[in-house]
Image (tube, grey):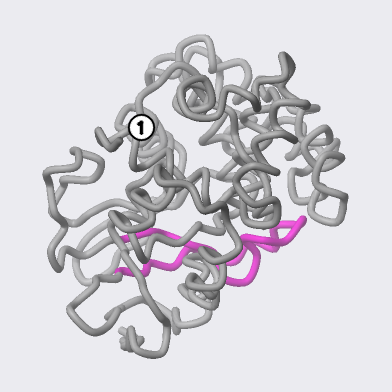
Amino acid sequence: MHEGTLALGDIGPFDLQATVESGQSYLWDRDDGRMYEGEGTSAGEAWYVTVVRPETEWALEDTHSGPEVVRVRQTSDSLQWEATFDADRTLRHRLRLADDLPAIRAATADEPLLGAAFDRYWGMRLVRDPPFETLISFICSAQMRVGRIFEMQRALADAFGESVTFDGDRYYAYPGPDALADATEAQLRDLGLGYRAPYVKRSAEMVAGGEAHPAEATDLAYEDARDSLTQFVGVGEKVADCVALFSLGFLEAVPLDTWIQSTIEEYFPDCDRGSYAETSRAIRQRLGDEYAGYAQTYLFHHLRNGGT
């Protein structure tokens, strides 16, 4: 077993629960079984766990490295982790621990609603999840609450993921493109994916067969990257924005889901331009351009949990 501690004094403001339970990522679980139960379930010092492939999860080609387990919890002054490998680099990358939150907040709009969201969840970071896992997670997100999306991803991992044992417990890696491409639509529907089943299968086939990979959008300009991601089956502009923001590092991306659309209607009606592309440009400019995606994520989590 490998273990480590990251001092919060070196990281800056950080909120582990808000970061991994805010609808950005569906690749973590809580060892107490209370993941995504809702605002009233404080994590305290609960352990969060995920399964990763440290050497290949952001690469275009899978070199078949084995899955590794990492568990992390937050105390009053540190992040403590234990893993089957040296997880320091992976945690810093996935949880964006190098982000300068005070500078990011200073670069966003001076809006009362946004200020309330920042104050309430101060320390929440954006995640940087692997592209394929993020793509499939958000293909599954259509018309679904966050808890149900999470359950779908756990079901996919349990059914098709490679298993790994750590500290006496068995965990399952998120299935790769080959595994989901080989799954039948019926199998996927049996896991609760419904009409999303053929979208997941066909998009996995595109990646497994070398036709396309979501990571290929990384080097494009932001709007070109969003357009590129819509080539995957079941991916519209909103899902593409989620992949761009929560995986590929486009911090200006603002996924226009129903929560943000309602926010625009109530608080920023001048930003509604009648089309996704034009409304996206307007709300990005209003929220602060470079870090508009950070602002959006704070607003989403705040409003979804009853904030005003």
Rendered residue at 33%/33% (across/down): 304
Magenta stretch, main secondary structure, is loop
Q: Is residue 12 left or right of residue 81?
A: right
Viewer-closest of 133 and 185: 133
Which quadrant would the C terminus be assigned to in this image? top left
Residue displayed at 40% across by 53% down: 115
Asked if residue 23 is positioned above or below residue 272 in the image, the reply reads: below
**Front residue of 131 and 66:** 131
Residue 12 magenta: no
The residue nearer to you, when weighing 237 against 33, is 237
Question: Residue 226's x, y, as percent?
Answer: 77, 37
The residue depicted at 23 percent of the width and 84 percent of the height is 77
Q: Is 243 located above or below residue 83 in the figure? A: above
Position of 224 relative to 95 (above/below): above
Q: Is residue 197 left or right of residue 83?
A: right
Residue 14 % position (x, y): 35, 70
The image quadrant of residue 199 is top right
> Percent x, y for residue 251?
65, 54
Relative to 114, 59 lies left or right: right
When asked about the image quadrant of residue 51, the answer is bottom left
Q: Is residue 232 visible?
A: yes
Q: Is residue 4 visible?
A: no
Dot 1 corresponds to which residue?
Answer: 146
In the rendered image, the quadrant that contains the N terminus is bottom left
Above/below status of 196 relative to 151: above
- Write the start and end of the magenta stretch as one range: 49-71
Residue 149 in the image, given as x and y percentages of width and height: 39, 30
